[in-house]
Image (tube, rainbow, N blue to C red):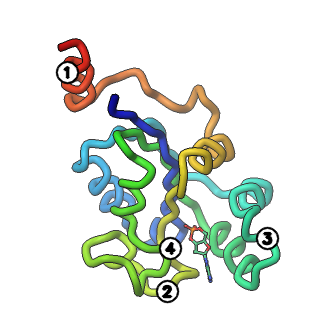
């Protein structure tokens, strides 16, 4: 059975300031993914520390925390088939220098520390990160895409 996944995506402050919210949403919507939740937020000290706990102590950690709190972030929950890996492909490699042509980071970022967008790297990270930024009652999974309808019909055949 094909499995759907939820993933967490955040457009970082420079992406918001450069007017890239629509561009980024467009890339996920035209893929057919569902946007289950989206909001503009100021990341709190606790959210920043929880989100980037695995990087605490690394040389770039203070800059990472400073960057993510330097202005509003556009946070989203996205759902789709293989969404965690698929969204990461659309986003591109962490270092924009190595990001494939056509990915968000290749198109809109230059350096690893200021790479415009975050996307979860596994299903467990996604669920952990979603819980940092969203309450379950802010997430709307109450409708179906055509792809979901077709795949559910296939399973009845
Ligand atoms: P992000 O997807 O938000 O997850 C962690 C972030 O840390 C990453 O994007 C980069 O912005 C940053 N990062 C990861 N590794 C390095 C590194 N070696 N040097 C600088 N920044 C890094």
Q: CA distance from mark 1 to mark 2?
A: 44 Å
- The image quadrant where one finds ligand 1 is bottom right
Q: Where is residue 125 drawn, in percent x and y?
A: 61, 50
Q: Which residue is mark 4?
A: 14
Q: Quadrant of residue 93?
A: bottom left
- Image height of 155 relative to 124, above or below: above
Label 2 C-beta lies within 8 Å of the nearest ligand 1 atom: no
Q: Quadrant of residue 33?
A: top left
Q: Which residue is mark 2?
A: 111
Q: What residue is at 70 percent from the left and 75 percent from the top? A: 66
Q: CA distance from mark 2 to mark 4?
A: 12 Å
Structural crowding at the residue carrying mark 2, measured as other residues with C-alpha within 10 Å and reported as few (<14), some (14–19) or many (≥20):
some
Q: Earlier in the sequence, mark 2 or mark 4?
A: 4
Structural crowding at the residue carrying mark 1, measured as other residues with C-alpha within 10 Å and reported as few (<14), some (14–19) or many (≥20):
few
Kind of element beneath mark 2: loop
Q: CA distance from mark 1 to mark 3?
A: 46 Å
Q: Earlier in the sequence, mark 2 or mark 3?
A: 3
């Amino acid at each position: 059975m094909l499995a759907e996944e939820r993933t967490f995506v955040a457009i970082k402050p420079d992406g918001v300031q450069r007017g890239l919210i629509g561009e980024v949403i467009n890339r996920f919507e035209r893929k057919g993914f569902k946007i289950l939740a989206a909001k503009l937020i100021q990341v709190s000290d606790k959210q920043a520390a929880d989100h980037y706990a695995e990087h605490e102590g690394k040389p770039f950690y203070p800059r990472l925390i400073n960057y993510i709190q330097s202005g509003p972030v556009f946070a989203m929950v996205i759902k789709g088939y293989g969404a965690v890996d698929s969204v990461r492909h659309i986003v591109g490699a962490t270092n924009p220098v190595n990001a494939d042509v056509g990915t968000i980071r290749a198109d809109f970022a230059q350096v690893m520390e200021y790479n415009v967008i975050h996307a979860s790297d596994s299903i467990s990270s996604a669920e952990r990160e979603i819980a940092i930024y969203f309450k379950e009652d802010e997430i709307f999974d109450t409708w179906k895409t055509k792809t979901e309808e077709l795949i559910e019909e296939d399973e009845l055949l």
